[in-house]
Amino acid sequence: MDGPPLPNDLLPPALADWLARRHWTLHPHQREMLARAEEPSLLLIAPTGGGKTLAGFLPTLADITEHGHEGLHTLYVSPLKALANDIRRNLSIPIEEAGLPVRVEDRTGDTSQARRKRQRADPPHILLTTPESLALMTSYEDAARTFKGLKRVIVDEIHALAENKRGDQLMLALSRLQAMAPDLKRVGLSATVDDPAVIAHYLARHPDPCPILHADPGPPPDIEILKTAETPPWAGAGGRYAIPSILREVRRHETTLIFHNTRAQAELFFHALWMENAGDLPIGIHHGALAREQRVKVEQAMAEGKLKAIVATSSLDLGIDWGDVDLVIQVGAPKKVKQLVQRIGRANHRYNAPSKARLVPANRFEVIECTAALEAVRAGQLDGDLRLDGPRDVLCQHIALVACAGRFRADDLYAEVTSVGPYSQLTRAQFDECLNFVATGGYALRAYDRYQRLKEWEPGVWGLRDPRAARQIRMNLGTIIDTDTLKVRFKGRGGMPLGEIEEGFATTLSPGDTFLMGGQVVRYENMREMTVEVSPKPDKEPKIATYIGYKWTTSVQLAERIQEILSDPSHWSALPGHTREWLDLQRHRSKLPQPGRLLVETFPRDGRHHVCFYGFAGRNAHQTLALLLTKGMEEDGLDPLGFVATDYAALIWGLEPVADIRPYLRVEGVHEALETWLAGNAVMKRTFRAAAIISGLIDRNFPGKRTSGKQATFSSDILYDTLHRYDPEHLMLKITEEEAMRGHIDFGRVELMLETIGDRIDHVALDRVSPLSAPLFLERGRVPIKGRAESRLIEEEAARLMADAGLSLE
Amino acid sequence: MSGTKAFAFAGERLVALPSGALWWPAAGVLTVSDLHLGKSERIARRSGMLLPPYEVEDTLRTLEQDMEAVQPRAVISLGDSFDDMEAAVRLHPDHRAWIMRLVESVDWTWVTGNHDPAPVAYGGTPADGVECGPLSFVHIATDAGRHEVSGHYHPKASLRVRGRAISRPAFLHDGNRLILPAYGTFTGGLRSRDPALSKLMAPGARAILAGSPMVEIPMPR
């Protein structure tokens, strides 16, 4: 690499000499980071492999080397534990080789208790951590001492953190640090994003400005749809048809990463790959549901270059650097363009070398999705869906954590919180509501005066009533809500751990059912002490193929591009022949969706009547519309059973056919239905549960110890119903509604869509499933409707079970 | 009453109510088990978690509705009526008065449970168990029990409908034993598949799912 010689005043001799010995010069953005080290906030936007992390650390290394430092100098926060480990290894190279007097340590959930204690008493110069570990550190009584001399904080992968509540929690923690160390400088490191100003607003202390540095984005990525001899199916999610072509690519490259959108798909694909691979290529599997031991084994083999390919999910997404990946294969359409670009970053981590990626659409609809995604990448259009209003459940947790560290003045804390970008618009009344909730539970019936969590010790000064509560508050820290999972182990044989499955999936298993775990077929035996016991069952197709994994959504922009391609056959030239034929078939059998109109298909299948509408308005809007439609259908006795929504369409199924869809698609009726609908459906209850856990209403592991298995947890749905009935103005219900309005229901879009469409509804009644609706049958995230139809089915199933068991009904 | 489920047990006709109560028309006896009144208070006292303090009101409302519907001569509260002895005395004065009113209106028996092992000051008759015609009522099923109605386990049962598990509090009965679901609003459940229950219940046991619709299925094990 070359560039103008380095100005000596920016780097201390030890570091400059080390660079010279290695014949390295700094990238322009790395030099600029050094020159602007004194900016209160600075955001660097750089592509993966652009020396982003070193750019963040150079000012720290230079400052400590030149001026020395007692105690903690720089805090580095990243979303992944693994990233902290990785950075520590990478940083140790310049530090050791240049002999810099810098001590680096990491601190994550894996760090031992003794080491954590020592780190607080005698902190290293650079501490690498995660948002949760940082929040925990700020909650200790000695936090002010630990962070007193802190000069810099580096937030890595800030674009990823800013997308969710972990980022909000981190920014609240930074406001605490800023109060303890007023001169603290903030640095954000981000991959390419659509709207850097939004991230800058997120990072900076409000209302400080935050300058943005752009690194050279590097050469454009080499990315195409993989050409396969095989034809993709109409519907299907695994991409198994393409295995011969994928194996050919794996042989041609050094190391290939094969990404899937869900764990279940990764499992199925890996299993199929193993069958066809004939064992001659070393291939591993890696995803978040595997046991730690299994993952570490794969990670090691990968680092040692022993694997030709890894089948993976998002657990590998963020920039962990593992050797010479030269090809990324994405199976299934990338549901977000941004994810696609970041995944490409995994190949050829060398700056200035184009990254190579191939997309494998799993079905013909995905051919169109992939084509649209590629157009978006080429147009430099990334989907941004950042939130600017800080969620109040995270604020409640923050207030409780602040109280753990000691008494606080409510006025001071309010001022501090509103210095956080996402909370800058928070009113004092909204803040006080949260404070009251943390203190007393916030119930209209003031039942807990005796037990309240926070006490106003003197006017305006709050603190824990009972300091022992700190332990429980700390245990429940964090904003990631996992569904409850159960460990899976082999029965007998020392009980080797295999990984985890969702509790909901586990309850549907009967002894003898087979499913995939860690790339192998296993047989469900029984459940013992909240652990699922299985036995190996080689050479058999799994009976139950899938379990619930992550739900991915396409962005709305991508949905709009897809509609453009679909509606106009002149766009089809970019599509392969089989996909053009498929669309032709749709045109002849049914209709193509047209802009400004709404295509609705109805057809019977598998003993159920289906309604499919193509709104191209995003999954949240479709979900809301489907909930409202099914509500109307239930009232009219059409017995809807459930629905599934994607970003381009929704599919509803029920026991009776819908003759005329128009009455259910009137904007006036929709508005009325919203109020009652908000009162209680599966989506709202899910939202409530997350808010209740984050804000500290219920414990994460409530009721704690599942030792006896007796009288186990009662569901948060009961709490939701109880609050609705007896305390409808409670903060938790407000937060649930805020969250739903923000994230899940997209009501404004539904209204807009229905107003735009008016009477322009194309209702096509078919005698069987249409080509375009076929992929919807494989979508995950089906929402059941609790109504008459469910009752009918429960009664039928109960009667069948009794008859099978030879028991009589009275 | 609509949506109930009648069944035969020990030669008697019993009716399972959707709320989880057991109605014995011939004897005029309504039995409810595991009310766990005062649970939110106890949780606040013991763990610091401040749950919505409305479960006493909700449980009493349901019970009052059941009593109005079947007009019982006698009510048996089959143990764990209070979440602990302290919760029994810490109830809101309005709720205390409400309980007294219900107790005074019928022949009321408080069967002791593991959560409330001593008599409570709410009137009625305290007892370790009740014998009534061919049936005996205790909190926890006994090994030697014969035609025995009990609670304690908070049983629930599930059935699969179109790939989805529907799980509800359930009555379990096998001709000799009958286990009632928990009646209180803030009570969880124990799967019938749990060894504690599947070992207790004889082969051929059935489960009646509470709620709506009420259905009877072979007890899942």
Image: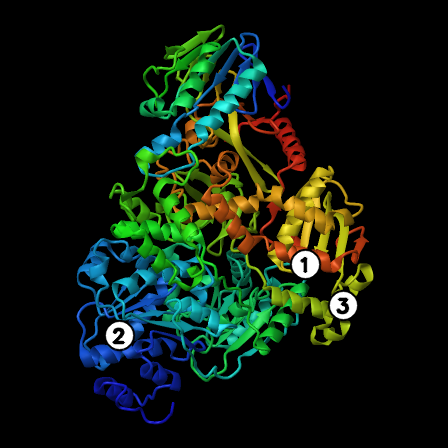
In the rendered view, tell whether residue A504 sits above or below residue A614: above
Percent x, y for residue A327?
Answer: 50, 75
Q: Is mark 3 on a helix, strand or loop?
A: helix
Question: Which residue is at the front of the view, A351 or A639?
Answer: A639
Residue, far front:
A459
Q: Are marks 2 and 1 on the same chain?
A: yes
* Number of numbered markers: 3
Percent x, y for residue A335?
Answer: 57, 64
Q: Are marks 3 and 2 on the same chain?
A: yes
Q: In which quarter of the image is the N terminus of chain A?
A: bottom left
Residue A92 is marked as 2
Q: In which quarter of the image is the C terminus of chain A?
A: top right
Instruction: Quadrant for residue B15, please give it.
Output: top right
Are the residues tagged 2 and 1 within 8 Å (C-beta)?
A: no
> Disc 3 residue type?
Glu
Q: In this view, does B51 lie to the left or right of A520?
A: left
* Mark 2 surroundings: few (<14), some (14-19) or many (≥20) residues within 10 A: some
The mark nearer the N terminus, 3 or 1, is 3
Q: What element carries label 2?
A: helix
Question: Disc 3 designates what residue?
Answer: A581
> Disc 1 residue type?
Leu
In the rendered view, tell whether residue A732 sits above or below residue A75: above
Question: Disc 1 designates what residue?
Answer: A752
Residue, far top:
B133
The mark nearer the N terminus, 3 or 2, is 2
The mark nearer the N terminus, 2 or 1, is 2
Question: Measuring 64% from the left and 54% from the top, which residue is drawn there?
Answer: A622
Foreground disc of the pair 3, 2: 2
Foreground disc of the pair 3, 1: 1
